[in-house]
Image (tube, rainbow, N blue to C red):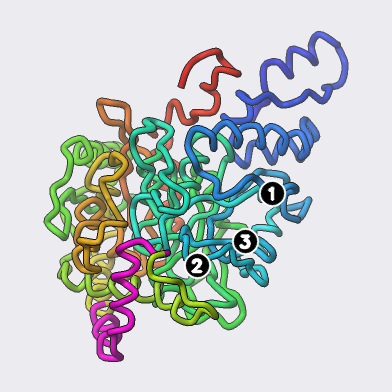
Amino acid sequence: MPYSNQYWRACATRGAEPMLITMELHEYVHLDGVGLAELIRTGEVTAHEVETVAREALAIADERLNGLTRPPFTRALAASADGVFAGVPFLLKDVPIAAGVPFTLGSRAVPDIVAARDSELMTRFRRAGLATLGTTTMCELGLSFATESARYGPTRNPYDPSRGVGGSSGGAAALVAAGAVPLAHANDAAGSIRVPASCCGLVGLKPSRGRVPCGPDTGEAAFGLLYEFAVTRTVRDAAHLLDAVHGPALGDKYLVAPPLRPYAAEINAPQPRLRIALTTDAWSGAPVDPEVAEATVRTGRLLERLGHTVEQAAPSVNWEDVLTGMRGGVVANVAPLLFAPRRPPPDALEAVSRAAMAEVRASTALDLLRTFDAHNRVSRAAGAFFGEYDVLVTPTIAQLPAPHGTLDYDNPAYTVDSWLRRLFEYGPFTALFNISGQPAVSLPLGRSGSGLPIGVQLVAGSGREDLLLRIAGALEPDFATEPRTAVDRDEHVHGGGY
């Protein structure tokens, strides 16, 4: 990726070898991770200069958006100087992932516990060279599609501060979309990578089950529903990061076939003719906003122009099975609080968490078996569907990014069941594939009449991230991502308002 016009003008003026020039904020925010890493690798800028401007961008973005859990680290966490993303600024979600880094799970009930050791994924993030600068906000215990916890307050959308950023990886999505960092850690147990990516106009890839490790402290996070990865602004960052972190760790329970070649090689690879299914109908029966549906249909037309066959079809699943399967995820997210050395007082938890805690205490082994039985039925239906189709196209969420307070997690009127039903009225398209294990990606392929991002979800058969990245690369020229950032609209840069 070429550096700034200022850089090349300086070279021409001096008639000499290119001279090192301090990176400017408006240049930084429009570069992706691969582009920044290349500038650092070739010596056009230093990692220190990039970190300095990243801290400036983070300060501006966090003041406006409330995406950090606490001030940035005094120093970036240690990482390789030789990795593919060496020196590239990065953020972690507010979960136990990095040794010595405190986490709260977005909850007042979790008192800044410090992770004892790196997860395997964090080891790989360090090996990739990512310069981790801080931790990002999430909803309490990851159980909402709105990042508006009682502990940290609402995280605001860069495209419209009156609206939310999705959840649970909302702080990560807000700060990447704002240009503060080019990519950030995220995870997904019902849509928590894809939903924020849709709300903030990003690429949000949920890998296949077993593609990215969850251990060593967890064998199957949330009964196999939780997937680790990141949100990014470009497809190539997603591909290069997946190359850096994929593959089983020793003792992993789930395994998936390795790719035949690097994922980064898929972006510009020739497109085989694929059989693609498309639906705008939610399995839950929830209504879909017309602008969201139109963005999905338009994506189908783009895929037809690329030479693929597109037809109306969708997996045939029982929605009650999906809900039963997701209740198991709620149990898995909340149950660890019962094993904590000091159980949280009920008034420290938000209302739905209290309801979930009561449900955990009342659960039996038979309830868990019902959950796994529902997982099996959903997985068999999805597996059969992808034996017939290569890719499925759906909306990522059913509605535009919601105004703050739309999904009120601290409302005592909700039971666990009624909360899940409300949650999946807003985002009914993602959770199925957490149960069944296929890879899925949200791409920023639409924009509402008021300028809000609209994500479109693409799902492939198990292990076929290569197909998703190849299609995403072909569709990237159509991404509705300008302006991608909010930081460079700061008055200190261009003299304009927010």
Q: Measuring 47% from the left and 65% from the top, which residue is drawn there?
A: 109
- The quarter holding residue 491 reads top right
Q: Where in the figure is residue 425, as x and y percent of width and height?
A: 19, 54
Q: Where in the figure is residue 202, as x and y percent of width and height?
A: 43, 41
- Who is closer to the viewer here, 117 or 375? 117
**How far apart are the alpha carbons under marks 2 and 1?**
30 Å
Position of 203 relative to 360 (above/below):
above
Q: Measuring 53% from the left and 61% from the top, which residue is drawn there?
A: 104
What is the crowding at mark 1: few (fewer than 14 residues within 10 Å), some, or many (at least 20)? few
Task: Look at the image and tell me whether residue 470 can be seen.
Answer: yes
- Who is closer to the viewer here, 428 or 462? 428
Magenta range: 348-374
- The quarter holding residue 32 reads top right
**Which amino acid type is shown beneath numbered disc 2?**
Arg
Residue that carries the numbered disc 2 in the rendered image: 211
Residue that carries the numbered disc 3 in the rendered image: 102
**Which amino acid type is shown beneath numbered disc 3?**
Pro
**How far apart are the alpha carbons under marks 2 and 3?**
26 Å
Task: Look at the image and tell me whether residue 233 can be seen.
Answer: no
Q: Measuring 33% from the left and 69% from the top, which residue is drawn there?
A: 354
Secondary element at image label 2: loop
Dot label at residue 73: 1
**Which amino acid type is shown beneath numbered disc 1?**
Phe
**CB of mark 3 within 8 Å of CB of mark 1?**
no
